[in-house]
Image (cartoon, rainbow, N blue to C red):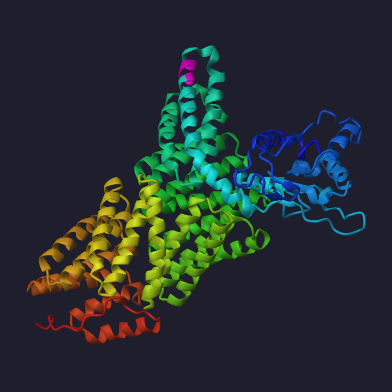
Amino acid sequence: MRYRAFLSYSHTDERWARWLLRRLESYRVPRSLVGTPGRDGPIPERLGRFCRDRDALPSAGDLSAAIKATLDDSAALVVVCSPAAARSRWVNAEISAFRSTGRGDRILCFVVDGDPEVRDSDRACIPPALLQPEDGGAMPREPLAADARRAADGRERAFVKLVAGLLGISYDTLAPREAHRRHQRLALITTAALSGMLVALALAASAYIARNDAQRRQLQTEDMLEFMLGDLREKLSTVGRLDLMRVVDDKSTAYFAALDPHDLTDRTLETQARSLIGIGQVRLDEGHLEAAMVAFREAHARSTALYQRQPDDGQRLFDRAQAEYWIGLVALTKGEYAEAGVWFRKYRDSGVALAAMDRANFDWQKEVAWGRHNLAVLDERLGRYEEAEREMRSKRELYREWLLRRPQDLALRSEDADTASWLGSISARQGKLADAEALFAEQLAELGRNAADDPGNAKWKEDQIDALILQAGAQAVRGRLAEARASIGAARPRADALARQDRANNTWQVTAGVCRWWQAQLAAAARDPLADELAAEAATILAGALAVDPKSERVLRSLAQVRNLQAQRALLRGDSALARSQLAAAAALLDPAWNARHNETLRLVLASTRLLAGEAAQLAGDRDGALVSWHQAEQLLIADAGTALPFERLDPMVRTLSHLGRAEEAQALRRRLAAAGYVPMQGFPAVGRIAAR
């Protein structure tokens, strides 16, 4: 046949059709597949010719003979699906004409807008002609649908699905080869794009000198910016190479600053706001919190200006809500909980208003769930576990319902896995240890499915590492140390690979350090001397991460935990001086953070530091100093405890009370731990008599 496929689309989607035609006709099949068997014989090097000729359409209601002949001469029909396409009489006529040739199984759908799951709605995007019964009354075969929407497959993955359908091979056969080739070419593409970006910016600067050319040059530059900070950023994100975007981010920021306020059209403001969100995300991953906050606040100012100009435009409200979320997240990361609460509540309210604007827009409905999620995270950080669990469970109920309708939505599956993870952490903090481990297992299972479906995506790898670390912790506190070692053993090489891939990604460096800390703890529990070496490696990595981001609570807390472990090891060797030195280093990290903001995670690490400081003082013969440190630990653990001590405080309190000689109180708390199935990694101390002295 003359054509590999005929592209059927609504004129509303002409931009998509042009992009798809260009990509299909320029596509080269991976070399390893050329010549292998396909549905229509050996797979060729290229896909061949495609037709999107709509010029022959008549003004009457029937297809022209030329269009029918072209359809007959096309091996397949690709339908660009959208609400406009579903309503188009020409798209439906072309589908009917192609099906009449008996080749209904050669129709492929490429969804660009709407909802493929609904039928009787303005959001329906599958043309009715695709759903009509066959001539014999049988229902038509469900056409292959590649969903290019961001909330589904995304444009690149959907394109690969479509190519696989055209070649007559499975997506799993094509995707790994395509991912490998894309990774090899990405660095070259990025270098070329960076050069083009610099040229465009230089042209823009010249254009401001020559005012008669300014508008054209500005539009050209902003087109380049949209590619660099949109499509290219998405590609680099999937392979974990956002380090290549830093030069672009800097140049973009300088370009925005140079613009005259009179040149800030709606389009310019929109481009700037979305670009600044991307820049802020990179800065946040790098651990540069202040720079990230600046970018997000600038994005919020621009998106707010746009929303005020068009308050009935839901997309404007959506863009502003994203900036509100990111500002809240940076505040949370910095431990500024009151500020985080202000912005998370703004984001929640924007999400509720957005969902009310269009009940059929699934992406906007999800904003309501994320509003609940963020406030639950804040509750968890502040020790309000029942409130946090209630909000997270209500969010997960929504996701369970959505996944029944969208089982192949990888982004939705990932978000549900994340919700399971949060519920696992909240359960663990309440002493529901078996529930916690089961929830972490659910998270890993869902992420494993994502990694199998989309093996080239770095996000699934990163999420799997975090899930393995959480699972190791849940296994360790139940006495399942062999399983915990296996989990963290699986996490560490993956974490190290990501850390090597992008040494400027501070988040990945910290994760590599945390893996070593867990390995050191588990080695210490097994009396393995390798624990000291692992702890030293963790300390080196985390100290480097802290130098990059000295305000990150996660980094300083993790480093303090390593110092505590090193002090514990020194105490076992009888070296009180080294133990005190390590504990002084931990306290120097924790005390300023605790004085600035109180939360449960900091409380527990600081209480452990005080507890160990008492043991170091006792070993050195300083009994009064030991008592002071243990009483400080006790005060930390009982503060704001309510009527019953929270479960996560029980282990350090048992140790503190045992050192203070209060055996009955310690024993009562140990019974609570045992009832929950808790097994300490380090044995509880014998009840001392130092308090009596």
- Closer-to-camera residue (619/123): 619
Q: Quadrant of the N terminus?
A: top right
Residue depicted at x 41% and y 36%:
246
Question: How far from the left and from the top, in percent, is residue 109?
Answer: 73, 47
- Closer-to-camera residue (273/421): 421
- Closer-to-camera residue (193/114): 193
Q: Is residue 304 visible?
A: no
Residue depicted at x 87% and y 45%:
96
Residue 627 magenta-highlighted: no
Dominant secondary structure of the residues highlighted in magenta in the image: helix
Q: Is residue 576 visible?
A: yes
Residue 289 left/right relative to 57: left
Q: Is residue 441 above or below residue 181?
A: below
Residue depicted at x 43% and y 76%:
433
What is the quadrant of residue 510 in the picture? bottom left
Residue 102 left/right relative to 612: right
Q: Is residue 335 above or below residue 660?
A: above
Total labels drawn:
0
Question: How far from the left and from the top, in percent, is residue 450?
Answer: 56, 58
Residue 206 magenta-highlighted: yes
Question: How far from the left and from the top, in percent, is residue 635?
Answer: 23, 71
Residue depicted at x 16% and y 71%:
571
| Extreme residue in the left direction | 621
Residue 662 left/right relative to 389: left
Q: Quadrant of the C terminus?
A: bottom left
What is the quadrant of residue 602 in the picture? bottom left
Q: Is residue 128 above or below residue 490?
A: above
Residue range (magenta): 203-208
Question: How far from the left and from the top, in percent, is residue 321?
Answer: 52, 46
